[in-house]
Image (tube, rainbow, N blue to C red):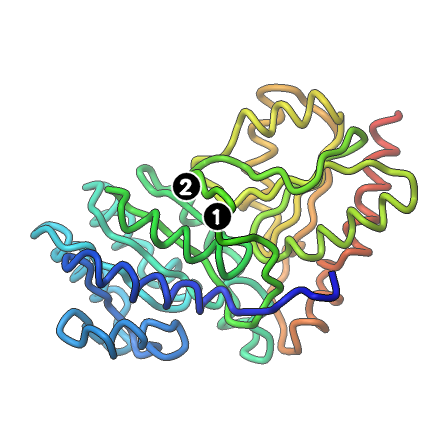
Amino acid sequence: MSEIKWKATRDGYGDALVEMGAQDERIVVLGADLTDSTRALWFAQKYPDRFFDFGIAEQNMLNAAAGLAMVGKIPWVSTYGVFVAGRAWDQIRTTTCYSNLNVKIGGAHGGISVGPDGATHQALEDVATMRVLPNMTVIVPADYYETKKAVIWACKHVGPVYVRFGREPVPIVTKPEDPFIMGKANLINDGIDVTIMNNGPVLWECMKAVQTLKEKGISARLLNMHTVKPIDREAIAKAARETGAIVTVEEHQVMGGFGSAVAEVVVQTYPVPMRFIGIQDRFGESGTPEELFEEFGLTAKHIVAAVEDVLKAKRG
C-alpha cells in the first residue's frame, strides 16, 4: 500500500476528453469560466474550434448543449457539480432528460475534498438531484483510471450522462486493465461477515478499513460501485443474502445519494441492517481534505466503527 500513486480524478476527465476528441469529431466541449480547473482546458488547447466558453452562465450553456446534441454533436458540459446540478437543474430536467438528448455533463469539485473552497463550492447534493431524473446515467469514479474509462464509455453511449469527479489527487487503486462495465460493481475484496459498498474516491479509506477489520478477525467484502444509476441490484442483493449486513460509503449527503440507492434495493430484495457513511445533513466547511475527512467522519476508523455497529445489529 505504501507504493500507491496519487492523481486527481479531474485529470482522468481531461485526458479522456482529449483522447476521445481525436477519435470522434462530433465531440465538443462547453465551459463556464472554469476551464482550467475542470481540465476542459486540455481539450480547448487541442481542439479550439470545438470548444465554447459561456462564462458564468450555466443555464444558457445547458440549453446550447441541448441544441448541439439535436444537430448530431456530442457535447460535454464542464463545470463544478454544485453549479450544474443546482443552477442548471431545470434545463437538465426539461431540455436534456425529458427529450433524452445526448448531452454529457462533467461535474467537477465533487464532495468535501475540494477543501479550502468551502461549502459554496463543495457539491454534496448533486448525485441525489441527478439520479432522480429519468434517462440520466450517474457515474462517480473512484480514481484517475476509472474516471477516464467512465468518460470514454459516456462518449460512446447515447443519452444523458453525469460523471462526477474531484479536484485533489487521490490514490490510484484501480488498474488500466481493470474492467469498467456500466452498472456493474467491482469486487475489491471478498468477505462473509459484512459488505462495505463504496462510491467514489473514498475507496482508499474503505481498503484501509478492510485491512483493519481483518486484523480484528472480521471478514469484510468490499464492492466498488462506480455507477449510482443504473445501480447493480444483483450485487447488492447477493451481498445482503451472503453477508447479512451492509455499510455504504460516499462523499455526499447520506440522504438521496448512493446509500439511499443501495437501501432502496435492499428493502425490496433482502432487508438487512445497514449503516451509512457520508455527509450527515450538513453543509461543508473550509479545510484540507484530510481535516475535512476527519471532521465529517469519512476515514477508515469511522468505517470500521460503522461496521462494528452494524454487526451488533446483525447479531441482534
Report whether 238 appears left or right of 165. Answer: right
Q: Residue at x 25, y 79 (%)?
A: 45
Q: What amino acid is found at the position of numbered circle 2 in the picture?
A: Val
Question: Dot 2: few (<14), some (14–19), or many (≥20) neighbours within 10 Å?
Answer: some
Location of residue 60 with respect to 156 vertically, above or below: below
As displayed, is residue 63 above or below residue 45?
above
**Front residue (pair 270, 139):** 139
Image quarter of the C terminus: top right
- Number of numbered labels in the structure image: 2
Q: Residue 79: percent from the left, percent from the top?
A: 36, 68
Q: Would you say 271 lies left or right of 167 here?
A: right
| Residue at (51% x, 46% y) in the render | 178
Most foreground residue, 264 or 167: 167
- Mark 1, residues whose alpha carbon is within 10 Å: few (<14), some, or many (≥20)? many
Name the disc covering residue 102, or none.
none
The quarter of the picture where the N terminus appears is bottom right
The image quarter in which residue 220 lies: top right
Say whether marks 2 and 1 touch (CB < 8 Å). yes
Report the front residue among 175 and 66: 175
Q: Helix or strand or loop: what does disc 2 sit on? A: loop
Estimate the x, y position of residue 276 in percent, counting from the top left.
69, 44
The picture places residue 294, in percent across and down from the top left corner, at 75, 66
User: Looking at numbered disc 1 in the image, what kind of residue is underneath it?
Assistant: Ala
The residue that disc 1 covers is: 128
Residue 4 pos. (x, y %): 66, 64
Provide the residue designation for mark 2.
132
Q: Please, what secondary structure does the residue beneath circle 1 have?
A: helix
The residue at 48%/57% (across/down) is 145
